[in-house]
Image (cartoon, rainbow, N blue to C red):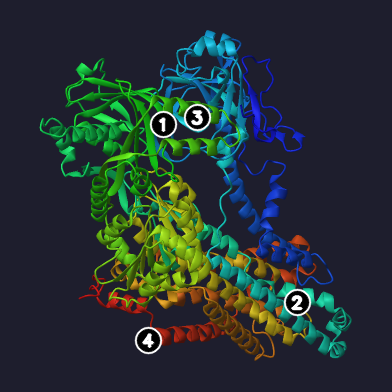
C-alpha cells in the first residue's frame, strides 16, 4: 500500500458531537507540523480587503502607489514648510484630500458590498449532525469533519465528501454555475461503502473511519483522498458491493475518494431531495475561496502613455524649477534695491529651498483632478455599454464590463483571436450523418440504422458492428434521461413519448438522440448500470464496470461494460487523431481507410467528427486491470500517473466501428461581423481544436476566408517539408482581399520551436490565419507570440474553459456567455452574449471610448498648463522671487470647480460619427488618427499650444492693465495690485479653456451645454462666496485676509476695462484655435470629418454605401 507523504495530506476525523474538537488538524508541512493554515476560524468567509481599523492606513497605502498621488503628497509637504511655502497649505492639502476621499469612498463602498455578501453567506442556516440528530447552526460555525445535510435546491456550504443521498444508487445531481458558470447538471456520487446510510441511526453507529485528503488547493476538477474504514465496517456494509472477483481482500480497509465524490461550496443540489456529506475543506480553504483571487490588473495603451506623459512633465517641471532657481540666484544682487524684496537676497542663497518653492508654484502643470475624472468617466462609460439594448442577448441578458480601464483599448485592436465552437458557432449540436463499417448513413436521425438492422439480408458482421455503434452512442457519455411523466415500467414508455436528455456536453445529447431515433433509447442510468429500451420496448441492462472520462490530453472517453451474456466490452469514442492509432492493428485496413476518407469528407463539409471503436475484454484481463487499478487508486502519491498508465494499457487494439458527423451551426451575423473586422484593418485568427478540413470549411462559410484571398495551407510535421511550405506561403502573392493561411497544430508547434522568425514574418503578411488542432495551452502561446514579437494590441474571444488561457494572454479578453458555461466570461475583461456583438463593441463603443479618453487627457493637461504658464511668465516680472500670481483659493477651485465639469461632458457624450455611418464605413476604424489617439506627438502639440496661449494671455493682460497710471477699478487711485491682475488673468484663463472645448467638441448635447456654462457660473459664484463670507473673517488663518481672500474681486468685476481686457485676449487666443481647426479641416481633413460634412450636407439622410 502506498502511504502518502506527510507534507501532502491531512487527516479528517468525523465529528458527531459538539464536544468533538475541530477536525482541521495541523498541516504536515516540510519541516514538521504547523498551525492550521485556514486563517479564519470555522467556515467563515472573508473576502473584504479592509476592516474598520485597517481601512484608512491600508487604503492610503494603495492610493500612494500611484505616482500621481505621490507627486501631490510632496506638494503638500512642501506647503507645510513656512520658509518655502508659496501659499497656504490648507488649499493644497484640501485639493489632495478631496481626490483621496473620492477614491476612498469608491473603494469603501465596494468593500462594504463584499462585507454584506460575506455576512449573508456566513449566516446561512445549515443542518449539521450533532449527538444523533440534525440541528440548525450558522454556516460560519461549521468545522472540518462535521456531517452536513443539504436539501434540494440548496447551496453546499463547504467542500463535502458525499456520504449518502435520497437516491439509493448514490447519484447526486448538482449545478455548478457559481463555480464555472455551467448550468448543465453534473453527476456526483456518494461514497460506495456509505451510500446505504440513509437515517440518523446508521450515521451515528455505522459511519466510522477517517479521511485522508490532499492539502487545500484551487483545482476545481482534481481531488485525491482515501477513506480508511475499520475492517468490521467493511465486512458489514460492503460484501455485496465489492467485486466478487477481486483477489486482494487485504486492501479493502482503505478506499479511494475521487473528485466524483466531492461536492464543492457554491454548487447547488438539483434533482436530489437531500444529500449528506462530511466537511473536508471549510471557509477560506474551500476550492471556491482558493479560486476567488483579486481582479487581474491590466494596463491599457492609454494608461502607459499617460504614465509616460506624467513622468515627462515631472522631469520638465524639475528642469524648469532648477532654471528658475538659477534665475533667482542671478538677480540676487539687485534685489537689495527694493524694500519689499529685502529678504530676497538672503533667500536667494538658499537654493535648495527656492527650488521646492518653485516646484510648488508650478504643481498645477499636472492636473489634480485628472485621475478622479478618468475613473468616474470610465466607470460611467461602462454603464452606457451595459445599458445598450443592441448589446443585449435574449438568453443571456446584457453584456458585462469587468475591466473598465480597458474601454479605450477596444478602439485600437489590431489582432483578433477567436475560438470556433461556441464562439463562431452556436454549440447546439445536431446529428447529421454517420458511417458504420464503411457504409454512410445520410438519414440516421430518421431511423435509417434501425431499418437496416431489421433487414434479414444484412451480414451478421455488419449487424454486430451497428449494435456496438449504437451501444457506444447510448452508453459512452454522461447523459441522463429525464422522462416527461412518471413511468413504472418500460411497458409504459411508448416509442413516441418525449424524453429530455441532460448532459454537460451538447454533442453527446445529439449522439444519444440519434440512437433513440434508431430504436436504442437511453431509459435509466446509475453508476453501476445503464438500462436501454429498444424499439420493441424491451429493457436491456448493462453493468457499468468502469468509466474512463474524457480529458483534453487523451481526447477520448471509454466505458467498460458487461452485457447480459457476460461479455465485457470496452466502448470508446473520441477525436480521429486520438483513435486512429489505437485502431490500426485490429481493424480491417480497407474498412478503416474507407472510414478515414468519410471522416475527412464530413470534416470538409464543416461537421464535427468523432470516431467510435470497441473491443472485447477477457475475464483475466479485467481482473488484472481491476486489481492494478484498485492498488493505483488507493495511492496518494503518483496516483494520477499510475491510473493514466493503466488506462493506456486498456485502451488498445480497438476495432473501429463507425464515424459520426455532428453539425454546429453558425451564430447569427457571423460572416458580416468577420468581414467588418477584416475591412476595419484587423488581422483575424481562428484557433480551434477541430480538424484542419473542418476549420477550413467553417472559415469559408463564415466569410473569414473568401475566394478573393490567396490561400496557403501548412500542415506538415516534417521539418524539411515544413520549411518548404513556409517558404511557398511567404512567396505567395496576395489576392484582392489579402492572404489567408491555414496551419495545423503540429506544424504550428514545430514552426514556433524552430522557425519563429519565419513564422512571424509570414503572419504579418496574412490578413486571416486559421490554426487547426490547437490545444488550450497552444492558443495562449500563439497570442503571446503576437504580443511579444509584434507588440500589437490583441483581443481574444472565446466561450469555454479551454479558451481561458488565450483570453488571459491577450491585451483584451472577451468572453461569450455560451452553452459551455461562464468560465471564459468570468475570466474575461468584457462578457458578451453573441459574437455579432463584437462588431458594435469595437467599432462604436471602443471607438468612442478611445476618442473620449484621449481627448479628456489632452484637454485636462491643456487647461492646467494654460493656467500655470502665466506663473512662469510672472517669475520674470518679480525677479524670480517665487511670488504667486493667483490667489490660493483660485488655485484650489480651478481643477475641481471652475473647470471640473466640461471634461466629464467630453468623456461621456463626445462622439464624431453616428453608429450608422461607422457601420457603413469599417475603414474608419483603422484611420491614422485612431490608431494612436494619444500619441506623444499629439500630446506635445496640444500642450505647446497651451503654453503659447498662457503666455499670450499673461503678456496681453499685464500690458493692458499697465496702460493706465492708476487702476481703473480703484476709487482711491492706487496702482493695479498683483491680486487684481491675478484675478483678471484667472478670469481670462477660465473663459479661454472653457470655450476651448467648444472648438474641440464634435457632438453637442443639452448636458454638454449645462456642464460648460455651469462651470463659468460656478467661477463667479465661488468668488462671490469667498468675498462675502470668508474674507471678513480672515478664514483659515490667512495672514493678510484682504489681499489673499479677494475683497478686490467686487471692484474688478464692476470695472468695464477689466471685462474688455478679458474679452479681447480670450478672443485673440480662441481665434488662433479656430484658425488652426479651420486649416486642418479644410486642407488636411480626416476621413471622419469628410463623412461628417457629407452627412450634414445630406440633411441627415443615409449616406451611400462605398460601392455605390
The residue that appears at 26% across and 67% down in the rendered structure is: 706
**Circle 2 — which element?**
helix
Instruction: From the viewer's side, name the closer residue of 625 and 121.
Output: 625
Q: Quadrant of the C terminus?
A: bottom left
- Find out whether the residues at labels 1 and 3 contact each other: C-beta distance under 8 Å: no
| Residue 25 sits above or below residue 833 on the image | above
Q: Is residue 294 left or right of residue 471?
A: right
In the image, which disc is placed on residue 547? 1
Whichever of labels 4 and 3 marks the residue nearer the N terminus, that label is 3
Report the residue marked by disc 4: 1082
x, y percentage for residue 17? 64, 14
Instruction: From the viewer's side, name the closer residue of 522 and 125.
Output: 522
Disc 2: CA contacts within 10 A as few (<14), some (14-19) or many (>=20): many
Q: In this rendering, which labeled residue sits more in front, label 3 or label 2?
A: 3
Instruction: From the viewer's side, name the closer residue of 850 and 1038.
Output: 850
Whichever of labels 4 and 2 marks the residue nearer the N terminus, that label is 2
Whichever of labels 4 and 1 marks the residue nearer the N terminus, that label is 1
Report the residue marked by disc 2: 358
x, y percentage for residue 967? 67, 84
**Circle 1 — which element?**
strand
Amino acid at each position: 500500500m502506498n502511504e502518502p507523504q506527510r507534507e501532502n495530506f491531512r487527516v479528517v476525523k468525523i465529528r458527531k458531537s459538539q464536544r468533538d474538537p475541530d477536525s482541521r488538524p495541523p498541516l504536515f508541512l516540510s519541516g514538521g507540523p504547523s498551525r492550521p493554515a485556514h486563517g479564519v476560524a470555522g467556515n467563515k468567509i472573508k473576502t473584504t480587503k479592509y476592516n474598520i481599523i485597517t481601512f484608512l492606513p491600508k487604503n492610503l497605502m494603495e492610493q500612494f502607489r500611484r505616482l500621481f498621488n505621490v507627486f501631490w503628497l510632496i506638494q503638500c509637504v512642501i506647503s507645510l514648510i513656512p520658509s518655502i511655502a508659496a501659499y497656504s497649505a490648507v488649499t493644497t492639502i484640501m485639493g489632495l484630500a478631496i481626490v483621496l476621499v473620492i477614491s476612498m469612498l469608491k473603494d469603501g463602498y465596494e468593500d462594504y458590498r463584499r462585507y454584506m455578501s460575506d455576512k449573508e453567506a456566513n449566516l446561512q442556516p445549515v443542518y449539521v449532525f450533532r449527538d444523533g440528530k440534525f440541528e440548525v447552526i450558522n454556516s460560519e460555525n461549521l468545522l472540518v469533519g462535521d456531517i452536513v445535510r443539504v436539501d434540494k435546491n440548496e447551496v453546499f456550504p463547504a467542500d463535502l465528501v458525499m456520504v449518502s443521498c435520497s437516491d439509493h444508487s448514490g447519484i447526486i445531481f448538482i449545478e455548478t454555475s457559481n463555480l464555472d458558470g455551467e448550468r448543465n447538471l453534473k453527476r456526483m456520487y456518494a461514497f460506495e461503502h456509505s451510500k446505504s446510510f440513509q437515517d440518523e441511526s446508521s450515521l451515528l453507529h455505522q459511519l466510522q473511519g477517517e479521511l485522508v485528503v490532499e492539502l487545500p488547493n484551487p483545482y476545481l476538477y482534481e481531488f485525491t483522498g482515501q477513506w480508511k474504514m475499520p475492517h468490521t465496517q467493511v465486512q458489514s456494509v460492503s460484501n455485496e458491493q465489492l467485486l466478487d472477483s477481486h483477489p486482494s481482500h487485504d486492501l479493502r480497509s482503505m478506499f479511494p475518494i475521487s473528485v466524483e465524490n466531492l461536492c464543492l461550496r457554491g454548487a447547488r443540489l438539483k434533482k436530489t431531495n437531500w444529500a449528506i456529506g462530511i466537511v473536508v475543506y471549510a471557509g477560506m480553504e474551500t476550492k471556491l475561496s482558493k479560486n476567488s483571487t483579486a481582479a487581474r490588473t491590466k494596463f491599457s495603451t492609454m494608461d502607459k502613455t499617460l504614465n509616460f506623459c506624467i513622468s515627462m512633465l515631472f522631469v520638465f517641471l524639475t528642469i524648469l524649477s532648477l532654471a528658475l532657481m538659477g534665475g533667482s540666484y542671478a538677480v540676487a544682487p539687485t534685489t537689495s534695491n527694493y524694500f519689499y524684496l529685502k529678504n530676497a537676497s538672503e533667500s536667494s542663497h538658499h537654493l535648495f529651498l527656492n527650488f521646492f518653492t518653485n516646484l510648488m508654484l508650478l504643481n498645477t502643470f499636472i492636473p489634480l483632478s485628472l485621475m478622479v475624472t478618468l475613473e468616474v468617466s470610465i466607470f460611467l462609460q461602462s454603464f452606457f455599454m451595459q445599458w445598450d439594448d443592441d448589446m443585449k442577448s435574449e438568453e443571456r441578458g446584457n453584456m458585462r464590463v469587468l475591466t473598465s480601464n480597458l474601454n479605450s483599448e477596444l478602439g485600437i485592436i489590431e489582432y483578433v483571436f477567436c475560438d470556433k465552437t461556441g464562439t463562431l458557432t452556436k454549440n447546439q449540436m445536431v446529428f447529421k450523418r454517420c458511417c458504420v463499417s464503411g457504409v454512410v448513413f445520410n438519414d440516421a436521425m430518421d431511423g435509417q440504422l434501425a431499418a437496416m438492422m431489421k433487414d434479414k439480408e444484412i451480414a451478421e458482421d455488419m449487424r454486430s458492428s451497428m449494435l456496438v455503434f449504437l451501444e457506444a452512442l447510448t452508453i459512452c457519455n454522461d447523459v441522463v434521461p429525464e422522462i416527461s411523466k412518471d413511468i413504472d415500467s418500460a411497458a409504459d414508455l411508448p416509442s413516441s413519448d418525449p424524453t429530455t436528455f441532460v448532459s454537460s456536453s451538447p454533442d453527446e445529447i445529439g449522439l444519444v438522440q440519434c440512437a433513440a431515433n434508431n430504436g436504442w433509447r437511453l431509459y435509466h442510468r446509475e453508476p453501476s448500470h445503464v438500462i436501454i429500451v429498444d424499439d420493441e420496448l424491451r429493457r436491456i441492462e448493462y453493468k457499468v464496470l468502469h468509466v474512463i472520462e474524457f480529458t483534453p490530453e487523451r481526447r477520448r472517453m471509454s466505458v467498460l461494460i458487461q452485457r447480459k451474456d457476460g461479455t465485457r466490452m470496452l466502448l470508446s469514442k473520441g477525436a480521429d487523431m486520438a483513435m486512429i492509432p489505437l485502431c490500426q492493428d485490429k481493424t480491417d485496413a480497407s474498412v478503416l481507410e474507407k472510414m478515414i476518407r468519410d471522416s475527412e469528407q464530413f470534416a470538409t463539409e464543416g461537421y464535427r467528427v468523432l470516431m467510435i471503436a470497441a473491443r472485447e475484454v477477457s475475464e483475466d484481463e479485467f481482473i488484472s486491470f481491476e486489481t492494478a487499478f484498485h492498488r493505483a487508486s488507493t495511492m496518494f502519491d503518483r496516483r494520477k500517473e499510475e491510473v493514466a498508465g493503466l488506462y493506456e494499457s486498456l485502451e488498445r487494439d480497438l476495432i473501429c466501428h463507425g464515424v459520426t458527423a455532428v453539425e454546429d451551426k453558425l451564430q447569427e451575423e457571423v460572416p458580416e461581423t468577420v468581414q467588418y473586422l477584416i475591412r476595419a484593418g484587423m488581422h483575424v485568427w481562428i484557433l480551434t481544436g477541430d480538424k484542419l478540413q473542418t476549420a477550413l470549411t467553417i472559415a469559408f462559410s463564415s466569410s473569414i476566408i473568401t475566394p478573393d484571398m490567396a490561400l496557403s495551407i501548412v500542415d506538415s510535421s516534417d521539418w524539411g517539408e515544413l520549411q518548404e511550405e513556409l517558404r511557398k506561403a511567404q512567396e505567395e502573392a496576395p489576392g484582392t482581399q489579402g492572404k489567408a493561411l491555414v496551419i495545423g497544430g503540429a506544424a504550428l508547434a514545430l514552426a514556433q520551436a524552430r522557425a519563429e522568425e519565419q513564422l512571424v514574418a509570414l503572419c504579418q503578411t496574412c490578413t486571416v490565419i486559421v490554426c487547426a488542432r490547437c490545444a488550450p495551452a497552444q492558443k495562449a502561446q500563439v497570442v503571446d507570440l503576437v504580443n511579444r514579437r509584434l507588440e500589437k494590441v490583441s483581443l481574444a474571444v472565446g466561450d469555454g474553459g479551454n479558451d481561458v488561457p488565450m483570453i488571459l494572454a491577450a491585451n483584451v479578453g472577451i468572453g461569450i456567455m455560451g452553452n459551455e458555461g461562464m468560465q471564459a466570461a468570468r475570466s474575461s475583461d468584457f462578457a458578451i452574449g453573441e459574437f455579432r456583438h463584437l462588431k458594435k463593441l469595437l467599432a462604436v463603443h471602443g471607438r468612442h471610448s478611445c476618442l473620449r479618453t484621449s481627448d479628456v487627457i489632452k484637454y485636462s493637461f491643456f487647461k492646467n498648463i494654460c493656467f500655470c504658464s502665466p506663473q512662469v511668465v510672472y517669475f520674470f516680472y518679480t525677479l524670480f522671487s517665487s511670488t504667486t500670481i493667483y490667489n490660493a483659493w483660485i488655485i484650489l477651485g480651478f481643477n475641481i470647480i471652475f473647470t471640473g465639469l466640461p471634461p466629464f461632458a467630453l468623456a461621456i457624450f463626445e462622439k464624431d460619427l453616428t453608429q450608422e455611418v461607422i457601420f457603413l464605413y469599417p475603414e474608419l476604424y483603422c484611420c491614422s488618427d485612431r490608431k494612436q489617439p494619444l500619441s506623444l506627438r499629439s500630446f506635445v502639440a496640444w500642450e505647446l499650444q497651451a503654453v503659447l496661449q498662457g503666455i499670450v494671455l499673461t503678456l496681453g493682460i499685464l500690458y493692458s492693465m499697465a496702460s493706465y497710471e492708476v487702476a481703473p477699478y480703484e476709487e482711491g487711485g492706487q496702482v493695479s495690485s498683483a491680486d487684481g491682475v491675478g484675478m483678471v488673468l484667472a478670469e481670462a484663463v477660465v473663459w479661454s479653456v472653457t470655450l476651448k472645448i467648444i472648438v474641440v467638441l464634435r457632438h453637442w448635447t443639452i448636458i454638454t451645454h449645462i456642464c460648460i456654462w455651469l462651470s463659468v457660473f460656478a467661477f463667479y459664484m465661488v468668488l462671490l462666496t469667498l468675498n462675502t463670507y470668508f474674507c471678513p473673517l480672515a478664514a483659515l488663518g490667512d495672514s493678510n485676509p484682504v489681499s489673499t481672500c479677494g475683497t478686490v474681486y467686487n471692484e474688478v468685476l464692476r470695472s468695464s476695462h477689466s471685462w474688455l481686457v478679458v474679452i479681447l485676449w480670450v478672443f485673440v487666443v480662441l481665434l488662433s484655435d479656430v484658425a488652426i481647426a479651420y486649416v486642418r479641416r479644410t486642407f488636411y481633413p480626416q476621413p471622419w470629418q469628410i463623412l461628417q460634412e457629407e452627412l450634414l450636407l445630406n440633411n441627415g439622410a443615409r449616406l451611400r454605401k462605398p460601392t455605390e
